[in-house]
């Protein structure tokens, strides 16, 4: 869950589905709290490309669109003008490189930007799934972001630092109820929750990590493929604020 209080209710967060002609697919996302209503449009050529880690050269327009809810892990501005929905993998080396960029963005845009973290564990990363589940187990104790940040700091692209024993130690270090955390992890309690994130990513056209969908104040969505440098994301955000 979010480190900040984000006011979300059932009536302000919804999607209106509709079939349009050609490539345009519209949806409505009611803003967080008193934030703006974001009406997504066909991104056209608004695609930021970088070397992705998931064996893809590009990302395509998300279909049927991104829906953010109170169940998402959100941090940053309480009433954001820009929303960054990131699909990521804790073992992915590009995600590990990109994570500090996202943290820096939040630090430099405290009143304008919020990020949403969603799981997209790649099958060829042996510890991606278990670490994703671990973050959700920590989330049960309101420590999702703390464990996520720690896994990005400690984890390596070969899976070192992300095996089950490591994850249980991190939970202990963070002061979690280890009995509850360990039971959650050992029983794969959060498997379906991780799978739900992954499915929403594939439905949105995500095929590599990190894959980030930026929703601007006017609802325009732009796809950011790969570990794009801070200056490039900053420029993109500044262009819509």
Image: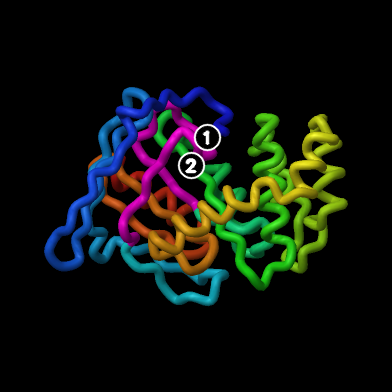
Q: What quarter of the picture does the C terminus occupy?
A: top left
At x 80%, y 42%, the residue is 183
Q: Are marks 2 and 1 in contact (CB under 8 Å)?
A: yes
Quadrant in which the N terminus appears: top right
Q: Regarding mark 1 in the picture, which secondary structure is present there?
A: strand
Name the residue beneath numbered marker 1. 75
Q: In x, y percent, where is residue 83?
A: 40, 42
Q: Residue at the location (22% across, 57% down)?
A: 25
Dividing the picture into quadrants, the one containing residue 38 is top left
Horizontally, is 221 left or right of 224 in the view?
left
Residue 21, given in percent of the width and then of the height, sits at 12, 64
Quarter residue 44 falls in: bottom left
User: 30 above or below 154?
Assistant: above
At x 23% / y 44%, what residue is drawn? Answer: 16
Q: Is residue 168 left or right of residue 84?
A: right
Q: Position of residue 9 (x, y in %)?
A: 38, 26
Identify the residue under disc 2: 115
Tell me which segment is drawn in magenta.
62-86
Q: Secondary structure at mark 2?
A: strand
């Amino acid at each position: 869950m979010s480190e900040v209080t984000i006011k979300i209710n059932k009536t302000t967060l919804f999607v209106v589905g509709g079939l349009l002609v050609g490539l345009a697919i519209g949806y409505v996302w009611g803003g967080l709290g008193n934030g703006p209503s974001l009406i997504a449009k066909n991104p056209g050529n608004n695609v930021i490309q970088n070397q992705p880690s998931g064996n893809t050269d590009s990302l395509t327009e998300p279909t049927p669109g991104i829906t953010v809810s109170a169940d998402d892990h959100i941090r940053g501005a309480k009433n954001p003008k820009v929303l960054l929905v990131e699909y990521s993998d804790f073992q992915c080396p590009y995600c590990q490189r990109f994570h500090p960029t996202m943290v820096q963005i939040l630090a430099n845009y405290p009143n304008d930007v919020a990020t949403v973290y969603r799981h997209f564990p790649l099958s060829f990363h042996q510890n991606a799934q278990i670490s994703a589940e671990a973050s959700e187990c920590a989330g049960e104790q309101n420590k999702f972001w703390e464990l996520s940040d720690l896994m990005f700091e400690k984890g390596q692209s070969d899976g070192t630092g992300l095996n089950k024993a490591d994850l249980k130690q991190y939970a202990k270090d963070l002061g979690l109820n280890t009995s509850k955390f360990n039971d959650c992890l050992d029983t794969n309690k959060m498997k379906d929750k991780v799978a739900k994130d992954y499915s929403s990513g594939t439905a949105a056209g995500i095929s590599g990590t990190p894959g980030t969908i930026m929703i601007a104040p006017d609802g325009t969505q732009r796809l950011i493929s790969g570990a794009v440098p801070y200056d490039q994301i900053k420029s993109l955000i500044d262009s819509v604020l």
